[in-house]
Image (cartoon, grey):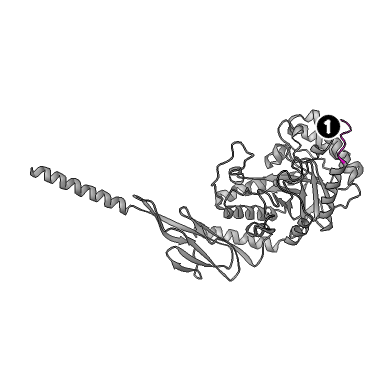
Amino acid sequence: MTKMEFSCIILTLIMFLSLTCISPMTIGKGTEHKMYRGINLGNALEAPKEGEWGVIIKDEYFRIIREAGFDTVRIPIRWSAHADDDPPYKIDDEFFKMVDWVVNKSLEQGLITIINIHHYEDIMQDPAGHKMRFLALWSQISEHYKDYPENLYFELLNEPHGRLTGKIWNELLAEAIRIIRVTNPSRKIIVGPANWNSINGLDSLIILENDKNIIVTFHFYTPFEFTHQGAEWVHPPPPVGKKWLGTETERRQITSLLDEAVKWSKEHGNIPLFLGEFGVYWKADMDSRVRWTYFVAREAERRGIPWCYWEFCAGFGAYDPKERKWREPLLYALIPNPNKHFVSAITDYGNITGTGWYDEGTYATIKLDKTAMGFLVRNVLDHFEGLKSKDKIIDERTVQIYVDGPKEIRAVWRKDCTQLMLIVIAACISIGMLLFMMKRR
């Protein structure tokens, strides 16, 4: 069996599992948990001011999200930019009204709605100085939403890091949970570990085990140099051009980390997990984004972990707000359509077209723009690897792939030294003739 055939079999099995094993996750011992597939409304309310980062939330977004098949929306919020700096750290009434509107629109669509404290940068640098302000924010938020439906969830803080170490964060989150429980005794509270909500930070996280309405979140952007290539806010930004091909090594890098998270959960009373963020920045090629997104989502589901994709309509976005439509390659990677399959084509040289999602029973036309490149030592197309009996070879650079499941083909190239050899032979002949003529003289 070739590596290509093995990859296709694995991808088919994952697709099968994603379509046949869709059921709610359970929390603790038998309590039904409705979260399954969600999306983040990022770059909106967590910007310094709404709209400053290019996203203004529209009420139709929540209908669009629900109709696409998502059941959860995570709403990042920069509360710290809208509260007084001095005690009692009052949150601005107008900002509360704006958040109310967003939350209500989401709940009206029957979506599980998560609100958090996002981009509270000051507490990362000075935890002691901002401790009371952080707790005051949650005192106000929990009081304000105490009578809201149970499908409104609270997430304490996005990606604790910097001077907010694991030890300090454990103490602070315990106090915040105690404050919330005064007015919201049974509301779901989401908590993530220090070190940017990474899986590696889970070992430092301490959660009260007697609270059965706690969910532990982690974020996933592995490999970072792929998911954040060209990201302007990363210094220095990882170079653009890295692909994710779904090789055995690449898949194992992801599954081993997810298995670590599951292992941690089992060691802590099967505390429920939540993949709160994952995604790939737009500067990566779309085929790689689709492969990675599809694989991470299905592997999380296979382990019973609900997820929220980062994000809806900005730099990682699955939705195009200008065209007012989903970017279908990403949407189908997140919410599989049982009658569509992804056809992937990989080449080391030249450009290849025709990859994407296709209806079952149709043909995908894959075409290379060139079949030879280089001068002295040329790279020449040898054949397409991964073709099956129903596939058609149209010409030396074009094939049609019959779509009856996920497909992956690769253009195989070989080195052609013919021109180099001709030049060497010609040079040898010329030198030989020159020596012969010199000898005759």
Residue 260 occupies which quadrant of the picture? top right
Residue 233 belongs to the span the image colors magenta = no
Quick one: SS at disc 1?
loop
Residue 96 occupies which quadrant of the picture? top right
Q: Is residue 344 above or below residue 265?
A: below
Q: Does 421 sit left or right of 323 as displayed?
A: left
Please identify the dominant SS of the magenta region.
loop
Instruction: Please say whether residue 210 is visible from this viewpoint.
Output: no
Closest to the observer, 325 or 300 = 325
Name the residue beneath numbered marker 1. 85
Q: Quadrant of the C terminus?
A: top left
Residue reaching furthest to the left:
441
Question: Looking at numbered disc 1 in the image, what kind of residue is underneath it?
Answer: Asp
Instruction: Please say whether residue 52 is visible from this viewpoint.
Output: yes
x, y (%) of residue 78?
78, 41
Q: Residue at x 46, y 61 (%)?
A: 384
Closest to the observer, 267 or 351 = 351
Q: Does 89 sit left or right of 390 as displayed?
A: right
Other residues around mark 1 within 10 Å, as few (<14) / some (14–19) / many (≥20): few
Q: Does 41 sit left or right of 211 as displayed?
A: left
Q: Is residue 287 above or below residue 92?
A: below
Which region shows up in magenta?
A: 85-92
x, y (%) of residue 358?
60, 65
x, y (%) of residue 336?
67, 61
Q: Is residue 11 above or below residue 169?
A: below
x, y (%) of residue 104?
85, 53
Q: Does 382 sit left or right of 320 as displayed?
A: left
Circle count: 1
Q: Residue at x 57, y 67 (%)?
A: 403
Closest to the observer, 172 or 127 = 127
